[in-house]
Image (cartoon, coloured by chain):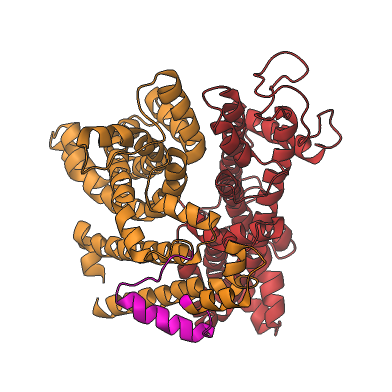
Chain colours: A orange, B red
Amino acid sequence: MLKFALRRLLDIVLVLILVSFFTTSLVNLMPGSPAFAIYGSSLSPQFLANFNHEFGLDHPLFVRYGLWVWHALQGDLGSSFQTHFSVASQIGSRLPVTAEIAVLALLFSLLIAIPVAMLAATRPGKLVDRMVTGATSVAQATPAFVAAVIFVYLFAVQAKWFPSQSWVPLTQDVGQNLLHAIMPVATLVLGISPIFIRILRGDIVSLLSENFVMVARSRGLPEWYILLRHVLRPASASLITVAGLSFGHLFGGSILVETFYSLPGIGLLASQAVYNKDIPILAGVVVCVAVVFVIINSLVDLSYGLLDPRVRTAR
Amino acid sequence: MTVTPGETVPPAVEGTFDARRRHRGAFRLGTGAGRLPRRRPKPVIMACALWLALMIVVAIFANVLPVKDPSAVIGAPNVNPTWGSEFLGTDAIGRSMVARLAFGARVSLEISILVTLVALVVGGAVGLLSAFFRGAVTFVADTIVNTILSVPGLLLMLAIVVVFHPTLLVLILAIALLFLPGFMRVTRATAVSLIERDYVVAARSLGASQARIIGRELLPNTAVALVTYAALALPGAMLAEGGLSYLGFGVQPPTPSWGQMIAQGQQQLNVAPWQAIIPCIVFAITIFALYSVGDWLRARLDVRGTASD
């Protein structure tokens, strides 16, 4: 177990080194100095030299990487090419919006997926099951921005139930904040809940034919109790895996959703950084997201042992 | 080998091994000849296939079909769909929606097909090599794959288009990068299980070269797994392209693409909602059709445990 954990840790460190090296080398991949991309091609040599000096672009790649790592370990991710503000503080100030949307989306996806999957799995092949399967494949084929357009048209333009294109921070007004969050969250839920439903439905169907379910049934336990006590726990292992992996979906979706609904989150920060050719901001976002992703996946791996005693003894 | 009556001999290699045509056999529908009953596809699948055929025809013949120039202003802006000459209306500056959808289909299909091919070839090659040589090759391949997977796909693509101007080539390579890990893992998983098979051992003992074993023994037998995964990657690539061009980092105007049309139409949602809704519907139906046909294909090819879910 210890060997496994150490290997895992080594993998993580290696991956993070490669990711951060990739983001540092982005500037080198760019033809010419990034100053040209931002301020146009006619720059005075003095301006160019100042720009390159301010952002440390006059150092060779490996020196820059060393400096970047040294600063990043102290919580300094450099500063924006455009506004010269600190990247870390910009990411920090926008984190709550993205985190709120993502956590709410994950929560509601699970709240929807678990009962729906149980409903479908206990009646395999019946009308309910086929309707659920059909609905999930339609929802899965609907990308976030398509869902967003349709939601806004139906609920903001036609029905005028929810506001779109604006945001109220949680600290300012909780009710308004939640009202503004409904459509973005619903858009993300539409993207990830079908994945949960599919996986969970398949799991439950196969678990219901296991011997321990037969034993529980012969003991006369009610069906809902069997589902909750005997089936949900083993099924949750794969659900947690998918939930961990869906982080990628969730973040990718939040770039689209935040851009669409103009929410001041990390996703909007990233897409604006691309517009502005603001490489330090994008690099900071990539590294932060990679760190979170890697940590989540490691926690998912660790959780197998907690959920399923068989895994603990197998190792 | 003597067999007493009533005793069944277990097939050596799942009953599919036939020395004379094992290579061609890999491409057959179903792993065993005629093991799957031939079933006619469901009506939904047929409809999906028809839709895809329509999209492909439109994409290939977009410049021959009687549609207008997609970047020319042909009339009043924001015309809603009518049964007239422009039955899907015009966009915010009066360009023909039909023409833009048709040329958008070309971009979408072109990019997603080329992405799948690039990812299939590169990922397949890396997967085969890493299954065959293991050790250092596997370590390097795994590390690179883990690195790619540690950044959400859309963000990784953004990191590439921030540096390079999004030309067709850049887009194809950037999106292909997202699907490399999948192809690599599927190929390796299949190839690793093949290496222990008798015919590979036999080829080895006959003194076949490494290149021959990889190219003639392993490659043809991983084809089914690769094709199955490609059917999954194709709609994925189309989604990635759509997302990127929705954000404005896909193919650049004047070339139209579906994602771009949705982004532009979205600003007109109060005035002329069809401008956004029509490309949305077309895009969603195409993705749905690709997934459905891909699923059907996977069921027909009957490969287990190779796809991602």
Q: Which residue extends farthest top?
A: B83
Q: Where is residue B169 in the image (x, y as percent from the top left)?
A: 70, 59
- Residue B21 sits in which quadrant? bottom right
Front position in the image: A47 or A144? A47
* Residue A64 vertical position relative to residue B252 in the rendered view, above or below: below
- Residue B74 sits in which quadrant? top right
- Give the total number of marks visible in the rendering: 0
The residue positioned 73% from the left and 43% from the top of the image is B254
The N terminus of chain B sits in image quarter: bottom right
- As for residue B260 lying within the magenta part, the answer is no
Front position in the image: B136 or B194? B136
* Residue A60 vertical position relative to residue A228 in the rendered view, above or below: below
Q: What stretch is highlighted in magenta?
A: A54-81
Q: Where is residue B262 in the image (x, y as percent from the top left)?
A: 58, 35
Horizontally, is A44 left or right of B106 in the view?
Answer: left
Front position in the image: B169 or B121? B169
Q: Where is residue B246 in the image (x, y as percent from the top left)?
A: 57, 43
Tell me if residue A124 can be seen: yes
* Residue A229 vertical position relative to residue B160 in the rendered view, above or below: above
Q: Position of residue A177 (x, y in %)?
A: 27, 37
Tell me if residue B9 can be seen: no
- As for residue A59 lying within the magenta part, the answer is yes
* Residue A242 vertical position relative to residue B195 in the rendered view, above or below: above
Horizontally, is A29 left or right of B100 in the view?
Answer: left
The residue positioned 24% from the left and 79% from the top of the image is A2
The residue positioned 29% from the left and 31% from the top of the image is A179
